Structure formats: C-alpha cells, structure tokens
Image (tube, helix red, strand yellow):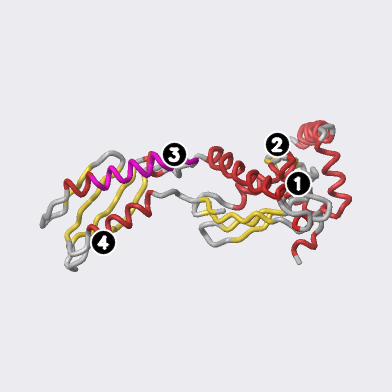
C-alpha cells in the first residue's frame, strides 16, 4: 500500500517538462497551503488534480518569451520564469507554504486503509489464513516517521517530567494511573500476550507500565478486532527507513516471534 503526497508534483513535472521543450527557461514553483497538504481520500485527490490542471493551463495561457525574470500568479500556484542559456527549459525549485502537519488527519486516513487490508484476510482460504499476514506500507510523506506510526499501532505514552523534584507526588499519581489502567478490559489481553512470549515488546512500548510510563490511549492493535488478522505492519518511509511493527495480539498461529525468521 502506497501512501504519499498526492498527484500535484507529478502533474506539474510532467506538464512543465513537455511545455518547456525548446524554450530556454527554468520555472520555479511555489504552492499555496491548499496544494501543499497531502490530499486524503478520493474527493480531495480529485479536487487537487483539477486545481493543479487548471493552474497549469492558466500558466500556459499567460506564458510569453521574455529576456528578464518574471512571475505568473494563478489560483494556488506562483510560477517564477527565469531565462537560461540552454535551449530546453525545465521545472526548477518547488517550494511550499509553511504548514502545520495534519498529523491526526493523516493517521486517521492511514488507519482506515490498514483496517481495510486487515479485513481482507477474512476472504482468504483456510490454508492461507494460517500464514502470517504482514501489511506493507510505502510512504512518500517526509513527516510520517516510525515514532508517529508506533503510537498509532501500540498507543500513546504518558511519562512524568521532573521526577526528582516531585518524586512523592509523581509516584502516587503514577500508581493511581496504573491501577486504573489495569482495571480496563484490555489489560487481560495484555497479560495473555505477555504470557505468550511478548513481554519484552509490551514493555518496550509501555503497554506494560514501568519506569513511570504507561499507555494512556491504546492503538489500533488493541482497539480494532480486525487487527487480529495482522501479524505486523512493515513501514518504509521517505527516508528509506524500514521498520517492522509486530502485533502481539494477533491470531494464535501468528502470535510468535517466529514471524521474524
């Protein structure tokens, strides 16, 4: 499953490379916030495709040969045309408006697609259902990293700052939180998973509280029954970093570290 920045850059590069043949200009591009954010869902993708194509068509109408640098402003995109010495032109620097990363929106959409993949295993043959099922994700988003994804799968972690200064209060509050945490229905599944060989992983992600840290909001592996179908998630990011997030709550035949061998 590929998860990326959308069609904007691809459309611009394809159209400008073709248009600038035999035209001695470098065209720099600045996108506004609307086209800088990754579109999520078919409706948004269709909208940014249309807006990008409308902009590039307007650029072509306004383009004219000039000996000096000039700009063309369209809805959502500013084009800066720079004369160059080489005979064929090319698209140059592509920049974005400063934006706040819509983390929650991206993770919600990503989780939706992961759940769709998880549900597909229900249609597998009986023989194939016995095999470990790994969902692979290839992300072009530079701000989707392993830490963000880890929280989405296992849960959001709470820790205590300035532990020495407020040691007594911290320890009291922590014990209260852990007591409440272990009273939740999910704790039974965590204990069962720990007894099945997953204790180290559960401690590493603080699903088993320790060192004054605990999970205050469970992730997809615990909250969605469909994720029992998934042995793990393989994530490859834009930085070419590959991470494997194992599911300690998956089906009984997959519930083993042997999935790594």
Residue 221 visible in rendering:
yes
Q: Would residue 198 be counted in the magenta stretch?
A: no
User: Which element type, helix, strand or loop, lies under badge 1?
Assistant: helix
User: Which element type, helix, strand or loop, lies under badge 4?
Assistant: strand
Q: Nearer the viewer, residue 151 or 123?
A: 123
> Where, by quadrant of the figure, is residue 173 drawn?
top right
Circle 1 is placed at which residue position?
Answer: 228
Q: Nearer the viewer, residue 122 or 140?
A: 122
Circle 4 is placed at which residue position?
Answer: 90
Residue span colored magenta: 41-57
Position of 66 with respect to 53 (left or right) is left
Circle 3 is placed at which residue position?
Answer: 44
N-term mark: 1 or 3: 3
Mark 4 is surrounded, within 10 Å at the Cα level, by few (under 14), some (14 to 19) or many (20 or more) other residues, namely many
N-term mark: 1 or 2: 2
Residue at image position (22%, 44%) is 58
Residue 221 coordinates in the image, percent (x, y):
72, 44
Foreground mark, 2 or 3, reads: 3
Residue at image position (27%, 47%) is 56
Residue 120 coordinates in the image, percent (x, y):
67, 48
N-term mark: 2 or 3: 3
User: Which element type, helix, strand or loop, lies under badge 2?
Assistant: strand
């Amino acid at each position: 499953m590929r998860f990326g920045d959308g069609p904007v850059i691809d459309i611009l590069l394809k159209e400008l490379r073709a248009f600038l043949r035999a035209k001695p200009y470098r065209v720099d591009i600045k996108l506004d916030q609307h086209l800088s954010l990754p579109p999520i869902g078919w409706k948004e993708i269709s909208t940014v495709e249309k807006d990008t194509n409308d902009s590039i068509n307007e650029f072509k109408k306004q383009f004219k040969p000039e000996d000096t640098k000039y700009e063309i402003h369209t809805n959502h995109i500013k084009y800066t045309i720079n004369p160059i010495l080489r005979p064929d032109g090319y698209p140059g620097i592509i920049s974005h408006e400063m934006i706040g990363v819509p983390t929650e929106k991206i993770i919600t959409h990503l989780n939706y697609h992961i759940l769709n993949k998880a549900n597909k295993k229900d249609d597998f043959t009986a023989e194939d259902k016995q095999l470990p099922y790994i969902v692979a994700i290839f992300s072009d988003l530079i701000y989707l990293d392993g830490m963000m994804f880890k929280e989405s799968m296992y849960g959001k972690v709470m820790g205590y700052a300035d532990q020495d200064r407020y040691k007594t209060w911290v320890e009291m509050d922590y014990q209260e939180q852990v007591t409440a945490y272990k009273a939740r229905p999910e704790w039974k599944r965590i204990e069962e998973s720990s007894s099945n060989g997953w204790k180290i992983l559960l401690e590493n992600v603080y699903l088993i509280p320790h060192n004054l840290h605990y999970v205050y909001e469970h992730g997809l592996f615990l909250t969605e029954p469909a994720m029992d179908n998934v042995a793990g998630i393989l994530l490859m990011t834009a930085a070419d970093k590959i991470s494997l997030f194992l599911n300690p709550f998956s089906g009984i035949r997959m519930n083993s570290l042997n999935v790594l061998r």
